[in-house]
Amino acid sequence: MKTIKQLLTIACICLAATGCKETFLELKPISNPTADNFKSTDDFELAVNAAYSSLYVIYHPEGAMSYVNEQMSDNAIVYNIAGIQADKWQFKDLTLSTTNTVVYQFWQDYYKAIFNANIVLNKIDGASLDATYKDGVKAQMMFLRALYYFDMVQTWGDVPIVTTPLTGEESYNVLRAPQSAVYDQIKTDLLFAIQKLPLASAVTITGRASKGAAQTLLGKVYLAMGDKASAATVLKEVVASNQYSLLPTYASLWGPTVKNTKESIFEIQYLGGSAAAPFSRYYQTYYPVTAGLGFIGTGMNQITDDLYNEYETGDPRRDLTISPGYTSGTTFTPQKFPIKWTHTGATIVNGVSLSNNNFMVMRYADVLLMLAEATGDVTYLNQVRTRANVPAFGTPTYPAAKYPTLDLAIEHERRVELAIEFQRFFDLKRTNRAVAVLSAKGKPITQAKQLLPIPQIVRLQNDAIVQNPGY
């Protein structure tokens, strides 16, 4: 029988090592250290980049955050996507079972990612290296661990907290910790990261975490915990740092060569054009299932009419986010799909589009909208609306009949500004609106069904791990 240790173990996919290059993705492995022989900065840089490579799994266009935040929400649906159809449709229909293979895969993905961070943290203190370097490495790994645990606690509620590599026997004693304990661990990690990470302008390897990224995540954590005062404090520090700003137009946020702008706070790096590189898969995965551009699209996260109609008349963000359909030959099919990550000139090899688009996990518009939520100050909301060239909240032309309160205005704004950026379901949960909003649209949502089930195989391996209510 497998142990939890086996579920947590991962063979590190080493994408890069050391050196002073523009981006960590361009760095070449110079060695293949095991956990037992981490000694030099070269060894640790290899392991650090393996930890960052976990982002490609977690934020994959078919990863956990895509399924939970988009498929379980009112933003997107899925058509004939590869894999076990029934298990994937269960997210859209909110009929998840304990034997769902995708849920189990996501559980594994997260603990593998956490293992990659933990193995570095476990070895770094004992290394004979510069103390400042060691603190920087620890801060990055704690940021990644906090990010993953934040996703997990929102997805499953109580989860086992693993902060060190475990033996098989030790793993049986690690049961689900209360959400409050998970949040405490997240806050501990992020407070250390904030102290030790550099400002964005001082990050020397593109794609690595910054102080602002840790602060932004902490602000989101505080909001999820209902602590608006603490959220406001830390998010105002992000604004006051002058490291970030809204780009002049919404259109300037998107494109295969648009990377790491002043609006980006934490961004996953991709290198298109080569099948050997970590190329971006969002374009092909979100394109409908047709050979319209020399490849077969996957049909993930196809846009609902409900999201399409959420945009106000004249809001330019709709046509920069959603295509109304596609043309194959001379036939137009009205199937809406996301286009933020379009790369029509991408190299295509064996029917695969090797796209170049990065993915922003956190950006400055999100900070401003969270500040509006935390403070009740409409000026933060209106900065985002002004950039989009739509009427400011509180002005005569704002659609107040549809969004009469600031809370509803923020909910609407987050939905259209951050559409298909893996935010929607967590937003509705955080504001206690998931049941009301989704049930009104025909989703069989309940308070219990806002959490995924603990995979049955996990409980078979350790029957002391309890199941979530409702499953």
Image: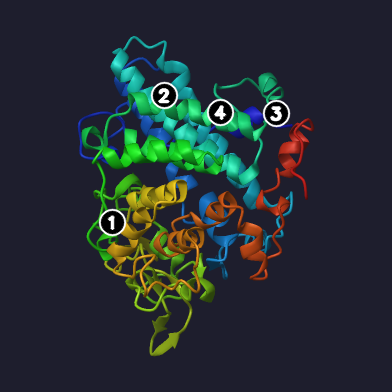
Who comes first in sequence, dot 3 or dot 1? 3
Label 2: which secondary element: helix
Q: CA distance from mark 4 to mark 2?
A: 12 Å
- Residue that badge 3 annotates: 175
Disc nearest the viewer among 3 and 1: 3
Q: CA distance from mark 2 to mark 3?
A: 25 Å
Q: Residue at x 41, y 75 (%)?
A: 312
* 446 lies above or below 160: below
Q: Is residue 47 visible?
A: no
Q: Are marks 3 and 1 in contact (CB under 8 Å)?
A: no
Q: Is residue 24 visible?
A: yes
Q: Residue at x 74, y 32 (%)?
A: 1
Where is residue 224 drawn, in percent x and y? 54, 43
Where is residue 252 drawn, in percent x and y? 24, 62
Q: CA distance from mark 4 to mark 1?
A: 42 Å
Nearer-the-camera pick, 98 or 298? 98
The kind of residue on which mark 1 rests is Gly
Nearer-the-camera pick, 264 or 325? 264
Who comes first in sequence, dot 4 or dot 2? 4
Crowd class of label 4 (few under 14; some 14 to 19; many from 20; radius 10 Å): few
Who comes first in sequence, dot 1 or dot 2? 2
Disc nearest the viewer among 4 and 1: 4
Label 3: which secondary element: loop
- Residue that badge 1 annotates: 273
Would residue 428 be found to the left or right of residue 254 on screen? right
- Residue that badge 4 annotates: 184
